[in-house]
Image: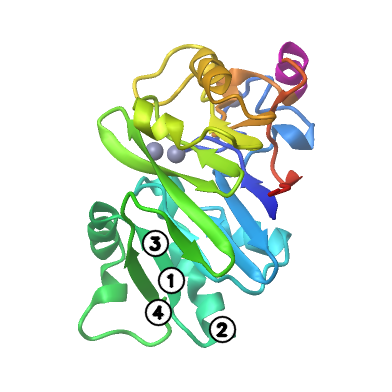
Amino acid sequence: MKVTILGTGTSQGVPVIGCKCAVCRSEDVKDKRLRSAIMVEDGNTRIVVDVGPDFRQQMLHHSVDNLDAILLTHEHADHIFGLDDIRSFNWLQKSPMDIYCEQRVQESLRNIFNYVFAENKMPGIPQMNLINLQNEKFRIASINITPIRLLHQFLPVFGFRFDRFAYLTDFNVIEEQELEKLYGIDTLVICALRKSPHVSHLNLSGALELIKRIAPRKAYFTHLSHEIGKHRDLLAELPPAIEPAYDGLMIEIKNH
Ligand SMILES: [Zn+2]
Ligand SMILES: [Zn+2]
Ligand SMILES: [Zn+2]
């Protein structure tokens, strides 16, 4: 299984529009962070988790011309506002896109993308096949997926375990029984917004604490704000098994 980190930025991305801080002015490509998303591939199956406003760029950058499904963690703008661009895949694949998300997220999609669900549809609009996501294991072709219930302050969101890889973003609370679902993973990608605390996101120390409890072989940080500093500086502060992720990072996951 191969995981591609499509974006590692928080909701505004890095650089932030108009910001003159050292991180936003950095020329290091690893300090350019599109909105957070990943792509998981196994054999011929390809899944994307979250479709933020940078989805089009992410698909073009990685020359993606086929997508089997989209999983949505939650309905915030930085995770869904690229959905109009699934039109290219609808056209290429001659089919609607399977979009897995929970009921509440589906209701948001029906509001935000009302033209997609309108009775009298305009020609050429995106075609979405909404599939109800519950806190139960499921499969997409060869890929086994275990949803992980997380709390983004008060908002329930989903993280996902794909065999021995897990992706957890936009949360600061996880119950014990959900944490147990993560035992035995090889690689974890987890959000760490910044060093100072935040009401709805894990900060660096909170993420480090969770990594200790889950004990993966390797962990990467994502959903990073410009406030966390430059990639190079953060990397130097962390132990060898933990790294800040960067856009375009590819990770091979050995399942057995
Ligand atoms: Zn987010
Ligand atoms: Zn900045
Ligand atoms: Zn969010």
Residue at the (29%, 84%) spot, across then down: 121
Decide: few, some or many residues near mark 4? Use Cα within 10 Å; few <14, some 14-19, many ≥20: some
Cα distance in 3D space between marks 4 and 2: 15 Å
Q: Which range of residues does the magenta coloring cover?
A: 232-238
Q: Nearer the viewer, mark 2 or mark 3?
A: 3
The residue indicated by pointer 2 is 93
The residue indicated by pointer 3 is 100
Q: Earlier in the sequence, mark 4 or mark 2?
A: 2
Looking at the picture, tell me which residue is in the foreground, 38 or 88: 38
The residue indicated by pointer 4 is 125
Residue at the (56%, 84%) spot, across then down: 93
* Amino acid type, residue under disc 1 in the picture: Asp
Cα distance in 3D space between marks 1 and 4: 15 Å
Cα distance in 3D space between marks 2 and 1: 12 Å
Looking at the picture, tell me which residue is in the foreground, 16 or 99: 99
Residue at the (53%, 32%) spot, across then down: 183
